[in-house]
Amino acid sequence: MSTLDEVLALLRTLAPSGTEVELTADTTLFSSGLLDSLALEELHVAIEERWAPIPPTELARANFDTPAAIAATVARITREETPVSVVRQLLSDSGRLTADLVPDGIERGAQLLFDTWHAGGTTLSCGNGGSASTASHFAADLAKLTIVPGQRRMRTLCLNDNASAVSAWTNDEGFPVVYQEQAEPWLEPTAALVAFSVHGGSRGGEVSANLPAVARLAKERGAAVIAVTGFDGGALGDLADVHINIPHATEPVATPLIESLHVLVHHALCVGARALILEKAGAAA
């Protein structure tokens, strides 16, 4: 969602009930009388809560008389990063994107994990950088959080946990193959691959080429692929059977925000898979 779209959404909450004017970027707000001075004060408060404090130099009414002018004002006050503005943006955006998460993708991902477990297959996970720690955390939780007494346990393996294997394949064959070579003996039709990546790997192969490479091998072998990404999903999103995306692309908050919400997603996948195992156990009782 662009800043202008967010401004328009905010203004709709401030417009008097019964107002039928269709807001556009150039709709005059205060000089036309559509909104009053009280609404202007409410707008100032909302902008400061959502984005950043408004400097006195930016308080001229002309800066708030159209949605486009407001969006431009927001762009100016957020251009200079301050501890207040960047923290508020991170917290505000994380709350909005959490609320916007579509349960359907997570539910389908949990179903694929359950199907892998039910078929006796192994779930592999991987990621680079901060996403490597998420992949490792996910594998641990998938093994432990999904335990249901009397039922088989999940088989999990994180491909970035073996430092010796990662460094050996990188040294001998190059970083793009580190995951596909480790996954080679594990990928079969009953397996699943869960790949975490902020950008999803570039479509041209310049960045994080190891992630699309192992996803392609998984697809060739008939294994399920779940991609948990940010930005536009990249090459991983294109390859996935289930794609769970956090659509944020504005740094400096995008990467930490996406990585934070990926942990929420991985926990949701684990509790969802456990619920399905529990349901099966109850049905068999």
Image (cartoon, rainbow, N blue to C red):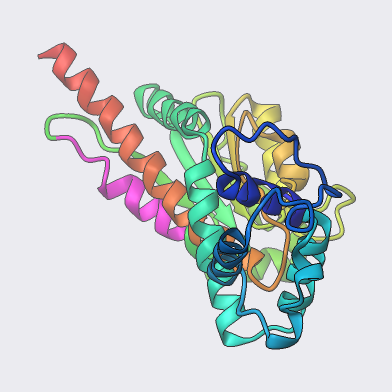
Q: Residue at x 76, y 57 (%)?
A: 176
Identify whether 210 is placed above or below 227: below
User: What's the magenta region?
Assistant: 136-148
Q: How many marks?
A: 0
Residue most toward the left?
285
Q: Give the position of the C terminus as an image quadrant.
A: top left
Place of residue 81 in the rendered image (x, y in percent of width and height, measured from the top left): 69, 83
Q: Residue at x 61, y 51 (%)?
A: 10
* Residue 42 colored in magenta in the image: no
Q: Residue at x 67, y 55 (%)?
A: 248
Q: What kind of secondary structure does the magenta stretch mostly adopt?
A: helix
* Residue 140 colored in magenta in the image: yes
- The answer, for residue 130, to whether it is visible in the render is no
Q: Picture quarter containing residue 276?
A: top left
Place of residue 146 in the rendered image (x, y in percent of width and height, measured from the top left): 27, 40
For the residue pair 196 and 65, the one nearer the viewer reads as 65
Q: Picture quarter containing residue 153?
A: top left
- The answer, for residue 285, to whether it is visible in the render is yes
Identify whether 108 is placed above or below 62: above
Place of residue 54 in the rendered image (x, y in percent of width and height, measured from the top left): 65, 79
Residue most toward the right?
204
Place of residue 33 in the rendered image (x, y in percent of width and height, measured from the top left): 72, 52
For the residue pair 164 and 125, the one nearer the viewer reads as 125
